[in-house]
Amino acid sequence: IYENCTSTGGTSFTPVNRNRNSATTSNVAMVINPTITATGTEIDGQLIPGGTGKKSSGSSAGSLEYVLKPLTNYLFRLTNVNGTDHAASLQLEWYE
């Protein structure tokens, strides 16, 4: 997780309010796959271990909770470091 990143481009993404009792729309602006020109300050890093070959397995970094600054750009990056294609995802949840 990086704070105060600088980016351009990417695909806009509209977050979904999962509270079915609320018609409030999110104040969050999200972009998927932007071009990062400066990562900013790293505030957290996690290693998600896996296996090799037929013994490979999934893993989870668990749950982290941060109170983020308003009107600040954040970069959440998932990086594959072994050079082999793997399916992966990030799930972000927040309160407004």
Image (tube, rainbow, N blue to C red):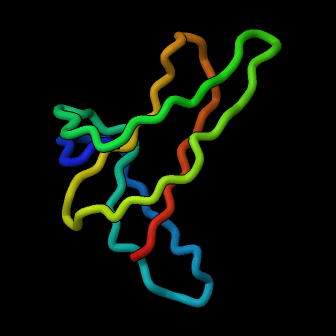
Instruction: Report the side of 52 relative to 74 (left or right).
Output: right
Q: Quadrant of residue 29?
A: bottom left
Q: Quadrant of the C terminus?
A: bottom left
Instruction: Report the side of 47 relative to 74 (left or right).
Output: right
Q: Residue at x 50, y 62 (%)?
A: 93
Q: Is residue 89 above or below residue 16?
A: above
Front-lying residue, 14 or 66? 66
Q: Residue at x 17, y 41 (%)?
A: 6
| Residue 58: percent from left, percent from top | 71, 31
Q: Residue at x 24, y 47 (%)?
A: 3
| Residue 2: percent from left, percent from top | 28, 42
| Residue 4: percent from left, percent from top | 18, 47
Q: Is residue 8 above or below residue 95?
A: above
Instruction: Report the side of 34 relative to 65 (left or right).
Output: left
Front-lying residue, 13 or 3? 3
Q: Quadrant of residue 30?
A: bottom left
